[in-house]
Image: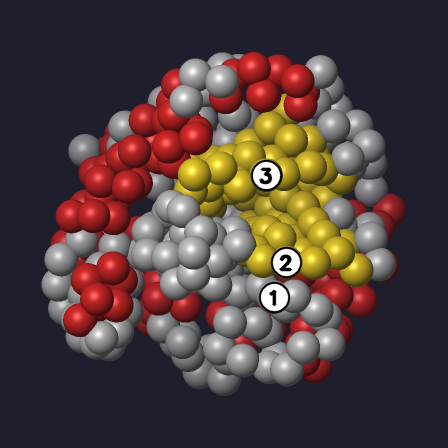
Amino acid sequence: MAADNNMFLRARDRTYAGLTEDKEREWKGPFYFIQAADPQLGLMKAWKVGDCDGGGDEWADEVRLTKQAVQAVNKLSPRPRFMVICGDLVHAMPGTDYREEQERDLKEALKGIDPGIPLVFVSGNHDLGNTPTPATVELYRRGWGDDYFSFWVGGVLCLVLNSQLFFDGSACPEQRDAHEAWLEEQLQRTAQGPCRHTLIFQHIPLYLRSPDEEDDYFNLQRAVRESLMKRFQQAGVKAVFSGHYHRNAGGFHNGLDMVVSSAIGCQLGTDPHGVRVVVVTEKEVVHRYYSLDQLSESGMDEDLKKLLA
Ligand SMILES: [Fe+2]
């Protein structure tokens, strides 16, 4: 049991066990990783019955899709360096019905991942609540590890952020301020630092299509967005990977790639259930969204070899 739980609690002390600067500082050549979002166990049923607050009482579909994703990722050769899940792990908000069962079943589905592929978790609004509190943040950290941290992979610095603290940190000002101070420190280090690229992972996109679009449920508020974009660009961040939208979207602005990936679980648009393959070369970070069916096809390995060549 302890061993099982350890794979979900590797983000501790603001870093990630096994993917530390000490071990992973050096660039060793191109690699790739898998970026996924929103398995969100329970949303498919809630969406179907039109009750997104209380309707998520079944999640067999999301469990099946998550297992399909895990099996497809396990078969990839070469192996991805890690798989990151950009939030909304489950649908039930903290302290509501089905929460514990959904988390238990998601862990059960994810346990099948090849032990050589670290799973990196990012907190979403459903994981923390739309207005997180110290208690909901703590609950998340007990289940899935730190809500924000940095890790290194082959010379690339990755920052996992808690976008709920940008969206509405009013009920946990201490956490919000600590996150902010930590982020500033990371960005300053990045600007001077020896990393090949810096990548950011968060749940809520900065924007969906254009940096000057109006605020809505699916992006960060304009003032917050503009300030973060400026700071990320100044620090030389290459890309921000997100979920939340349950559709593929994004844009490219002043050297910063804003990547919005659709869901493993419920689709709100016309994209297939899928994940994104992200290839990191010395100069570039390139990515493409694959449906879970495509990911399971035999041609994938050839695709990967070409991209990594
Ligand atoms: Fe979501």
In this rendering, does residue 174 appear at all? no
Q: Which mark is residue 288?
A: 3
Find the distance from the CA under tag 2 to the CA under tag 3. Answer: 12 Å
Q: Quadrant of residue 101?
A: bottom left
Reading the image, the residue beneath label 2 is 250
Residue depicted at 54% across the width and 80% down the height:
216
* Distance CA(mark 2)–CA(mark 1): 5 Å
Which quarter of the rendering shows the C terminus?
top right
Q: Is residue 14 above or below residue 49?
A: above
Q: Secondary structure at mark 1?
A: loop
Q: Earlier in the sequence, mark 2 or mark 3?
A: 2
Question: Amino acid under label 2?
Answer: Gly
Query: Which residue, given by chain and number where applicable, does mark 1 sit on?
Result: 208
Q: Nearer the viewer, residue 250 or 147?
A: 250
Q: Does label 2 or label 1 sit earlier along the sequence?
A: 1
Does 118 sit left or right of 278 as displayed? Answer: left
Q: Residue at x 27, y 35 (%)?
A: 67
List x then y, in percent, for residue 246: 43, 59
Q: Are marks 2 and 1 in contact (CB under 8 Å)?
A: yes
Quadrant in the picture for the N terminus: top left
Q: Quadrant of residue 54?
A: bottom left
In this rendered view, identify the residue nearer to me: 170 or 112.
112
Near mark 2 (Cα within 10 A), the count class, few <14, some 14-19 or many ≥20, is many
Q: Position of residue 132 (x, y in %)?
A: 41, 74
Left or right: where 76 falls relative to 20: left
